[in-house]
Structures are given as structure tokens and as C-alpha cells.
Image (cartoon, rainbow, N blue to C red):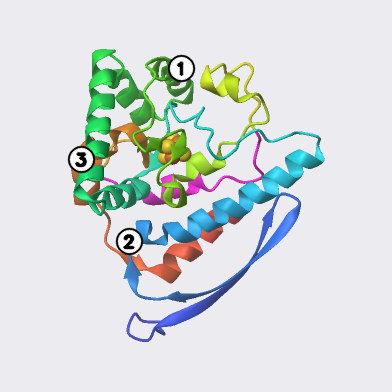
Amino acid sequence: MTEQNRPQAETIEAEIRIGSESVRLSARISNDPVHLHEMLPLFQHLTNKVVEIGIKEAEAKGMRISCRSGCGACCSQLVPISEAEGIALSDLIGAMPTAGQTEIRARFSRNMAALRQAGLLENLDRAVLDNDRERLRAIGIDYFKLNMPCPFLENQSCSIHPYRPLSCREFLVASDPLHCARSDPERVESVVLPKRISPIVYTMSHQKKQPGKGFLPLTQLLTREPSLREGQPSPEPAVDLLKRFLEKLAG
Ligand code: SF4
């Protein structure tokens, strides 16, 4: 089918196996070209569904999920976000009222200054560039010791909850929140989800001109923003992006 002959929208139907459940996806999707970050509401919705199934499965095994609203015990960790989420979150900050925006930007700057001062920045950049999981885990522990709450954390709650990163949604524990608060990896009992959407979105949003593998630490969001926007790939029909995503999800 040539580009001119494509219908304005297509109905995409898919049956997705997620752990013990089959999830039916039926969506009328436009063929208009979009950037990947414009597809994030769909990826967030699917992530919520995966988490819902993951919780059911964990509870069936006798685990009790301890994550609760108002518990920000894990929100001082090194959080990875996709490049697509980097653009969407920068837009979100840019749309905030001036006072709130100034405060959030100042918190990001403070966190970056602390990271630099602790001598972690260069190592972190290298580990992200190489996608070196072992080093990222080790840096994650040092990062946590700096005690830098996420700039979006307000009164122990996520101030951008509906728009929070996929990796924040996917992090669930069945252990005492104290172990998250002390970043005690040996005692944190994470819930293993039947699928993870975030790595698919990292791969899909990887910009060829960007270093790394399509993700960046949330804390570096504002310093990386100009290059993320500059290197953004051309928009593609939303249907094509969704089909690519579903292939990767099934794979
Ligand atoms: S974005 Fe929200 S949920 Fe994620 S670390 Fe920050 S405050 Fe916590």
C-alpha cells in the first residue's frame, strides 16, 4: 500500500499473552505521523495492565505487596527513563506554572551538582553508554547514599503520578518499605512481572545520534533535553509504531 492509499485510521486487534492471562487489545489508531513519546499513554496503560496481572500472580503465591500511595521510600533511587519519556517529561515541566517549574528545575540542578561533586557522573555516563548492568547496580547504591529525592517527589508522593515513568510503575516490592528506604538490595523482595514494557520502549526510542541504548537516568533529564529534542527521529504513522511495539512485546 502506498502512503497516499493508506486509510486515515486502522483498527488494530491483538491478543497478548501476559503471564497467566490473555489481554485483548482493540484500538482505532490514526495513520497520522507521530513521535514515539506521543504513544506513551498507550504504553503506560499496558504497563498498568501488566502490573495488575503481576500483583495478582504474586498474591496467588502468597506475597503481600507493600507499595502504597504516600510511600516514597524508593523515590531516591537511580530511575531509568526512555529517551521518549525524557521528551514527554520535559514537555510536562515546560507546561507547569512558572513557580512550580522553577522549583523543579532547581531540584534537578541540585541533584546534578551533588552527583558531580560525589564524582559519580562520569562513571554513570560510561555505564549508561555501555548499558553495563553490573556497574549501574553498583552506582545505583552510591547514588542512593547521596539521599537525593526525585525532583517530582512532594510529601512522599509522586507529584506527576499519572505521567510517572514506566520503570516507576514496574517497581513493586513485597518487603518492608524500610528496606527500600535504606536501599538494602539483599532484603528488598521485588515482584517479578510477567512482562516489562520499559525495555521495549528504550529500544524503540533509541536515537542513533544519542549515546547509550535508549534510556537515561531521570536525574539527567534536563541536561540531556536539548540533545534529545535535536536527535528526535522523524515522526512515523502511529499504526506502524504500534505494530512494531506489538511484535517486540510478543517476541
Ligand atoms: S517520578 Fe514519581 S514515582 Fe518515579 S521516582 Fe520520581 S517521585 Fe517517585
Question: Mark 2: few, some, or many residues within 10 Å (few <14, many ≥20)?
Answer: some
- Magenta-drawn stretch contains 195: yes
Q: How many marks?
A: 3
Instruction: Give me the C-alpha separation between circle 2 and circle 1.
Output: 34 Å
**Residue 206 percent coordinates (x, y):** 35, 46
- Magenta-drawn stretch contains 213: no
Magenta-drawn segment? 191-209
* Label 2 C-beta lies within 8 Å of the nearest ligand 1 atom: no
* Label 1 C-beta lies within 8 Å of the nearest ligand 1 atom: no
**Marking on residue 121:** none
Q: Which residue is mark 3?
A: 102
Q: Which residue is mark 2?
A: 35
Q: Which residue is mark 1?
A: 141
SS label for mark 2: loop
Instruction: Give me the C-alpha separation between circle 3 and circle 1.
Output: 29 Å
Q: Residue at x 36, y 29 (%)?
A: 128
